[in-house]
Amino acid sequence: MSTFDNREEAFEKRYVHDQEMEFRAAARRNKLFGLWAAEKLGKSGPEAEAYAEALVTAETSANADELVFSKVKDDFAAAGVEQSDHRLRRTLDELLETVRRELTKG
């Protein structure tokens, strides 16, 4: 193998690794967001876990971030929970950064 081939292979492996880490980070973020939202909705225990898992499942869909946001926003509106769009998106962003830090630490 030439040096170029080795570099190309290393780049491809790094890309796959980065994509896998982003997928894991988004799934973990969605779980934490789901647990946060479940608490605001008055859910606990298995009911809260099921709610959070439903948001993790959304990660495999196209526009997953928007689906997660919309689901929680709609559920909050139906339950009369007051949270602004800005607060919901900020919570999503903060949780993603927290999860990324956790994943890079190992």
Image (cartoon, rainbow, N blue to C red):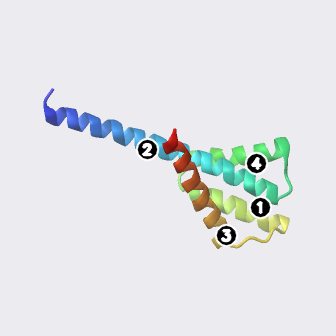
Neighbour class for label 4 at 10 Å: few (<14), some, many (≥20)? some
Left or right of residue 55: residue 102: left
Question: Residue 26: where, in percent of width, then height?
Answer: 56, 49
Q: Amino acid at mark 3?
A: Arg
Give yes or no for contact between labels 4 and 3 (Cβ–Cβ under 8 Å): no
Sequence-earlier tag: 2 or 3: 2
Nearer the camera: disc 4 or disc 3 = 3
Sequence-earlier tag: 4 or 2: 2
Secondary structure type for disc 3:
helix
Mark 4 → mark 2, Cα distance in angstroms? 25 Å
Q: What residue is at 64 percent from the left and 61 percent from the top?
A: 69
Mark 4 → mark 3, Cα distance in angstroms? 19 Å
Asked if 47 appears above or below 2 in the picture, the reply is below
Q: Which residue is mark 2?
A: 19
Spot the residue most to the front.
Answer: 105
Left or right of residue 12: residue 60: right
Q: Which numbered marker is on residue 75?
A: 1
Q: Which numbered marker is on residue 87?
A: 3
Mark 4 → mark 1, Cα distance in angstroms? 11 Å
Spot the residue most to the left.
Answer: 2
Question: Residue 18: where, in percent of width, then height?
Answer: 41, 43
Hey, which quadrant is residue 64 in on the image? bottom right
Mark 1 → mark 3, Cα distance in angstroms? 15 Å
Secondary structure type for disc 4:
helix
Q: Quadrant of the N terminus?
A: top left
Question: Residue 15: where, in percent of width, then height?
Answer: 36, 42
Q: Which numbered marker is on residue 51?
A: 4
Sequence-earlier tag: 2 or 1: 2
Asked if 17 appears above or below 35 in the picture, the reply is above
Q: What residue is at 61 percent from the left and 50 percent from the top?
A: 29
